Image (spheres, grey):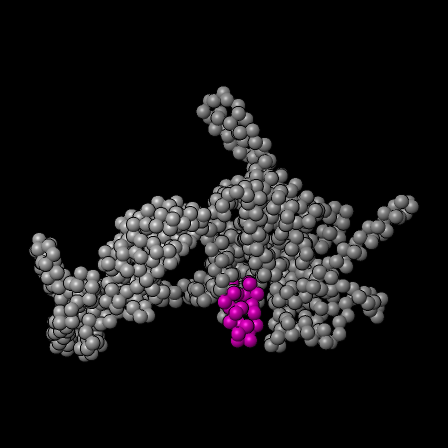
Amino acid sequence: MQNSLDTMVSSVMNNLESPTMSLDNMAVTSEQLSTLLPYLQSMSRLSSLSLKNNNLTTLPPTMSKLEFLTNLDVSNNPFFNIIETSRSLATMPSLKALSITLDPEEATAVPLLIPSLTVLNSAPVANNGRRHNAGHNQATPAHPNAHATMHASDPDVAIDLESVEELFAAVKVLHGNGARLPLEDDRRMSQAFDKHANAVLSRLNSRAGDLQYQHDKQAETLMAKHGIYDVCFQEIISYSDKIQPDLGQVLRKIRAVHTALFQGVPPIVADAVEAAATACEDEIAAMSSELNKSEEETGQLLEAAEMLESEAKVHQQEMLKLKKHIRKLESENSRLKEVVLAANASEKAYVLGGSGGGVVTGMQTLGVGGGGGRRTPARKAGGGGGGRGAWEEEGAGGDVDADVVGSAVEALSTMELGSQVRSLTLKQTLGFIDELYASKEKFDEKAKESHLPRETMEQHMYTFLNQRYGLKQLIVENASAVIKAVNAFGATENAVAVFGKIIRNEIDEEFRFVQKQLVDTVKDLLRVHLKAKHALKSDDVIHNMAEKIENSTISAEQWMDVVQYMYNGDDAMALNVMLKDAAKRWGGARLKEIEGRESARGSERRVGGSGGGASPGDKMPFASFMKVLLDFQLLGHDKFLLKFREKFGEADKDGDGIVSEQEFRSLCAVIGKVRVKGATGGKGVVRGEQEMAALLKKADPWNLQKITFSECVAVLSGDIIEMMTDIHERAMRVKEINEKRGQRGMGRL
């Protein structure tokens, strides 16, 4: 015996780091298992233990010390009492799967005694203690005819009694002290259970027919379930009377209180239903009152809207008169300017007021191209930028007619001349832009599905405002407010600047997604940088560190690493210089602020002593860092499309940001790499009809004769790159020739 125990101990000690341990077929007794438990406890990773085919009659109460054991196999052991064995197993805190030899009634009782079990004899155990299928250990109903006599006739009050039957089977096991009851006692208890259950269900069926509402049926069903479970309670009381009469008395009192509580449920349900009905009636009355009030207010609003529209028409007529007068003045101004220029050519710069030149009237639109000069509503916005001025007189797309757009022009004119136009905050402006972008995406998707032409962003803004307000006056006021906000915030907020350029057809709509991707990439690279610097920290800690930087300041080391990874040598160098300058400006302003606070407090301490020794250019706000990158990206894209905008503006005859097939063909003839000489000796781009057909298929798949500026950029992006590369190569060749001519003392080309 001792040698056998030594063998077991040796086996355990040789596997201290193993998560599994098998002591099968080793004639292990209950006493030997008690001796082995301290050694098993020393297996810190033990999660699975097999003790099958041994001589175990009981399990020691110290099984609970195997805290991490989740799987236990004690099948084919001669246990004296399964109930006591189950109670020992129930003390094990992590036990989930158990294999043990059971008869059918024991198979029903064990899951109830060990609530933590999820698998018994390789079969899942449901939450209520029942197993789906335990093979030969499948639990049987309390009585062979139980299922046939326990169904309610009304499906709304049907009761699943399988759990009650299994609980009653467990009670019978208690009466048998862990063993099967004698046949006569088993039959007596089963008949009593069937009789009681049938009586309860019969009463439920008879009362359910008189109940109209679902909640009443549910309350009655709950009382019926209580009545059926009560028979199990009574049998437990009967068992308690045999083993401990005092316990039986206590259980009787509990049963009486329990019954009284359940009998109070129907009155509570009735009161609750009555209170809910009263509250519902009050709510309906309140809603009816609110509805009547809303109808009255709607009528008043409609009357006010009609008045506003009538006033707007009057104002529009007055605006048209003023517009004609302004055009007349501008025409006279232009004539006088030509006279002055002709008479005083040598003093032109002074007469025009500088190299930017021109007189900008109150009618100036959003266009801010490089041409400067005087602009009227009929001319395109932007020096050579494709598309018409953002608020031209012509139709703006959607359901808004030319009068509405003309009114918007006049509203902007009056704004520039000093009238009051509503000012939007930056938050309101960004919110409007996001809403407009979202509406545009939905509109484009529907247009694609319905084979309809896309709108430019400018056109869709009028469609969007028209759908939101409907009244011309409100559309005019809101369009004017947006124009004013773009002019106010475009220089300081990149998102507003991008929106302004999209509206003016200076860049393509899809560029806004490039900016978003840039932000996401920078944040990802910041996390990569932090992970490289702090390799031992968890991802959650790195994430929190990155968020802290994004909400405060970024150091020079961090931004240089990000910039170096994202950009080539020249761009990275230029960006680092720009970032260093921005950091110095921010640091200098911050030092002045600190000095001001110290001076106000009368402190004699040096400001440098409280600055931590950091140089003003060593860090900057993360938001300022992102603005530099976004502005750099926008500037590069704007320069990239500069030549294309000029060519698009030449092809777009009416300046609405949309070209027809013929105009698109004209545009394609000048976009791309210069390939051949024309008949007049000039160079140009020649495309075959097959190539043109392919381009048109992409740009205008349904032959709608309407191709937006953004669609042209998307389709001709490769040709734009070729054109810009060709221009760059020619510029480099000219530079090289001039350098050689300079070395020879010759003039520049």
Identity of the residue drawn at 65% across and 59% down: 385
Residue 657 position by quadrant: bottom right
- The reply, left or right, for residue 117 in relation to residue 583 is left
Return the x and y of residue 447 as percentages of the image width and height: 53, 72
Residue 602 lies in the magenta stretch: no
Q: Is residue 329 visible in the rendered structure shown here?
A: no
Residue 447 lies in the magenta stretch: yes
Depth order, front residue of 581/389: 581
In the image as oriented, which residue stretches furthest toward the right?
744
Identity of the residue drawn at 27% across and 49% down: 61
Residue 28 position by quadrant: bottom left
Q: Is residue 522 visible in the rendered structure shown here?
A: yes
Return the x and y of residue 678 as percentages of the image width and height: 82, 69
Depth order, front residue of 504/163: 163
Identity of the residue drawn at 46% across and 26% down: 600
Identity of the residue drawn at 71% across and 73% down: 692
Return the x and y of residue 468 as percentages of the image width and height: 44, 64
Depth order, front residue of 395/339: 395
Q: What stretch is highlighted in magenta?
A: 441-463
Depth order, front residue of 357/522: 522
In the rendered image of this protein, does residue 709 appear above or below residue 425?
below
Q: How many labels does the image show?
A: 0
Return the x and y of residue 497 as percentages of the image width and height: 57, 53
Q: Main secondary structure of the magenta part?
A: helix
